[in-house]
Image (tube, rainbow, N blue to C red):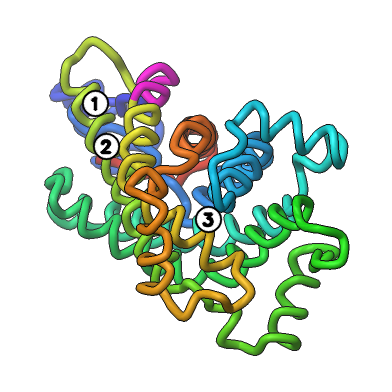
């Protein structure tokens, strides 16, 4: 942040300025930058490109009926059967999801937060950040449900027998085929869980990131730099993983089903029959995927904000 030039109390110094209209910034006014509403979608998309293989392995682990393979074993199995490029199956759907789900939740959260901070002339309390993050995540989760459904199916397709594969060419092809073959309702299969999960993830990522960054800066030991962004985003990614994992497992099963689950509660009941650990199936790869994704997202987001954000004077 840059400190603005101060006004001089000496009239002779003021008169010496070539274009002096008596307007200048006071000593305590600072130039700051805030994010543009679409920065979150861009940052999340870049992060998704870097962490997509981890997301794919997580989906494969969660859709196992019995725990047969762990993370490394599943990775080796996918590469051995389909090749290295198979780790990027469904990337187009993943990017489509980020540009709907993440674009919406970041856009809502950061736009409302910045406006409230401006109106209140101070930072929002944590409970308001939690409520705003949950609302933004819920809306974003609903908007992103169709792309999320296609993403899960494309990632899981490679482990199905050839005759049972859906073989979506790309995200748009998948969306159109689901609409034509299964109807509009199927596009929003699992929307309740996706929206609820979106709310929980956003509380963990957005609200906890803001709060942890605020607390780190308040210590005075660190400034608004990459190290601060890294530490805050690691904490936020961990919170998001713990909060959303049970719903993430159920959502993945529901979206990947061929109508064998009668609904959300039926899916919950069937998953529960596998034992409590079934709700945390794939927790390690989920953390290994979500924490780096959160870190990359915020590192890119903060760089975009600092270089291309909207300039405000506070």
Distance from the alpha carbon under mark 3 to that under mark 1:
34 Å
Residue named by callout 2 = 24
Specify the quadrant that holds the C terminus: top left
Residue 205 pos. (x, y %): 36, 43
Specify the quadrant that holds the N terminus: top left
Rendered residue at 36%/66% (across/down): 269
Distance from the alpha carbon under mark 3 to that under mark 2:
32 Å
The earlier-in-sequence mark between 2 and 1 is: 1
Q: Main secondary structure of the magenta part?
A: helix
Question: Is 4 within the magenta?
Answer: no
Mark 3–mark 2 CB contact (< 8 Å): no
For label 1, the crowd category at 10 Å Cα-Cα, with few meaning under 14, some 14 to 19 and many 20 or more, is few
The earlier-in-sequence mark between 3 and 2 is: 2
Residue 86 pos. (x, y %): 81, 43
Q: Quadrant of residue 221?
A: top left
Q: Is residue 74 left or right of residue 232?
A: right
For label 2, the crowd category at 10 Å Cα-Cα, with few meaning under 14, some 14 to 19 and many 20 or more, is few
Residue named by callout 1 = 6
Query: Is 16 or 254 nearer to us in this picture?
Result: 254
Mark 3–mark 1 CB contact (< 8 Å): no
Residue named by callout 3 = 38
Identify the element where label 3 is drawn: loop
Rendered residue at 45%/71% (across/down): 142
For label 3, the crowd category at 10 Å Cα-Cα, with few meaning under 14, some 14 to 19 and many 20 or more, is some
């Amino acid at each position: 942040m840059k400190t603005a030039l101060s006004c001089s109390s000496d009239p002779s110094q003021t008169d010496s300025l070539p274009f002096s209209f008596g307007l200048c910034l006071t000593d305590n006014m600072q130039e700051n930058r805030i994010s543009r509403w679409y920065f979150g979608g861009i940052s999340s998309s870049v992060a998704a490109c870097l962490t997509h293989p981890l997301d794919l392995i997580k989906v494969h682990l969660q859709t196992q009926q019995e725990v047969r393979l762990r993370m490394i074993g599943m990775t080796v199995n996918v590469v051995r059967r389909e090749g290295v490029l198979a780790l990027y199956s469904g990337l187009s759907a993943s990017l489509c999801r980020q540009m709907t789900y993440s674009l919406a939740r970041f856009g809502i959260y950061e736009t409302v937060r910045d406006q409230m901070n401006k109106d209140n002339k101070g930072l929002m309390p944590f409970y308001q950040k939690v409520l705003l993050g949950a609302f933004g995540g819920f809306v974003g989760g609903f908007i992103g449900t169709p792309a999320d459904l296609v993403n899960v199916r494309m990632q899981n397709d490679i482990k199905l027998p050839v005759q049972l594969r859906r073989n979506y060419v790309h995200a748009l092809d998948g969306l159109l085929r689901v609409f034509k073959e299964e109807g509009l309702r199927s596009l929003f299969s699992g929307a309740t869980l996706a929206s609820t999960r979106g709310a929980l993830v956003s509380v963990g990522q957005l609200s906890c990131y803001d709060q942890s960054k605020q607390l780190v800066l308040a210590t005075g030991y660190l400034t608004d730099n990459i190290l601060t962004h890294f530490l805050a985003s690691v904490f936020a990614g961990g919170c998001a993983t713990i909060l959303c994992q049970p719903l993430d497992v159920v959502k993945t099963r529901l979206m990947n089903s061929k109508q064998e689950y009668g609904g959300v509660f039926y899916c919950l009941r069937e998953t529960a029959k596998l034992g409590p650990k079934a709700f945390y199936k794939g927790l390690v790869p989920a953390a290994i995927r979500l924490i780096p994704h959160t870190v990359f997202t915020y590192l890119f987001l903060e760089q975009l904000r600092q270089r291309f954000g909207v300039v405000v004077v506070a």
